[in-house]
Image (spheres, rainbow, N blue to C red):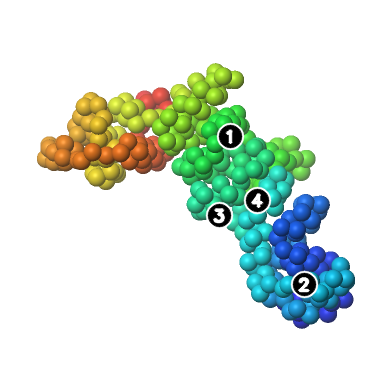
Amino acid sequence: MNDLNKVAYEELSGYQKTALFLYLIGPNKANEILKQFELKDVKEIRKVIATLAPVRTSLGIKLMEDFLGEAESITVSESPQDFGRQLSESKSMVNSLLDEGFVADNVRGLEELKTQTPEVIFNLIDGAHPQVIATILAYMDDNKSAAVLELFPEGKRNDYIYKIAKMDSIKPTALKDLALILDRQNASEDGGTGAMPIGGSKTAANILNSLTPGMDEKALEFIGTDNPVLSEDIRDKMFMFVDLMQLNPMSMQKIVAAVETDLLISALKGQPQELVEKFSSAMSQRQSARFLEDLEDKPPMKVSEINEAQKQILSTVRALADKGEVIIPGKGEDYV
């Protein structure tokens, strides 16, 4: 902990005095003041705040006398860490940092951001520069990105997906601080090479696969009005639940073995008989008979529940495909 109480006031650095001053005036006013600082200074100030020990009133008074001459109005909080958290969670502060390609220290970069709930991620990035949001969403897992995107209004959601689809890489010189946090900066000394692959039509297709059915079509229509070629390219790379009909018997056996029976029954409730038979034919005769009986006895389900089950299965299929255990015709490299 950074205990400023043990340091003579005259020996405090400019960053320490500034951090203490912002801590004392509260996050709302602090946000407005920090907008006037350079990004490198904001980082240093936030580092001090993040490690502050509880501040004695006497030190606060001394500082405010030095800065404002209004010591009578001082109220000292007991928890500098709570203040730091409020500062990070405040949208105006987060947005100003994200606009410069910087992700809040509290999440320690996008790798840790991945572990947060969609709601937390949404609150951190909402209102930031659209290209920054698209970059963050392109970097995260497809399912998590889809869950975050569903929290945005339709117009913004479609626009971010479009931006993701048009991306193919991000230069280390662009959004430099974001690249540093990701620990992916590999540019040459002149900054002209070492672009990091990110986004693209395949990434957009994977995210669309994870969206609630219906949202994907609206996004494709939005993209198609401006770029029909890209929209069609994304559609070609998408893999829907009904596309499981295209898989060979060996791939179907892998899926049946990897997916829980209850989840499979939920996903196939109300689906075409051909699709049901596609799965049952990948089972043993005894397993198939029991499966079809359980599917028949399955009580009515909400469409949203069926869609969610299908999304989970498609996620498993894509994971198996990435390992080479399942072959998805037309969705990757050809096999001979």
| Cα separation between marks 4 and 2 | 25 Å
Q: Is residue 207 left or right of residue 85?
A: left
Circles 4 and 1 in contact, beta carbons < 8 Å: no
The residue carrying mark 2 is 74
Q: Nearer the viewer, residue 184 or 61?
A: 61
Residue type at tag 3: Glu
Give the mark, 4 or 3, whose residue is nearer the N terminus: 4
Q: Secondary structure at mark 4?
A: helix
Q: Quadrant of the C terminus?
A: top left
Give the mark, 3 or 2, whose residue is nearer the N terminus: 2
Q: Secondary structure at mark 2?
A: loop
The residue carrying mark 4 is 91
Q: Image point 68% across, 72% down: which residue?
A: 77
Q: Is residue 161 above or below residue 89?
A: above
The residue carrying mark 3 is 112
Residue 3 in percent (x, y) is at 72, 77
Circles 3 and 1 in contact, beta carbons < 8 Å: no
Residue 1 in percent (x, y) is at 67, 74
The residue carrying mark 1 is 156
Circles 3 and 2 in contact, beta carbons < 8 Å: no
Dot 1, how many residues are within 10 Å of its Cα: few (below 14), some (14-19), or many (20+)? some
Give the mark, 4 or 2, whose residue is nearer the N terminus: 2
Q: Residue 145, can we see it?
A: no
In front: mark 3 or mark 2? 2
Q: Image point 63% across, 66% down: which residue?
A: 82
Give the mark, 1 or 2, whose residue is nearer the N terminus: 2
Residue 176, image quadrant: top right
| Cα separation between marks 3 and 1 | 24 Å
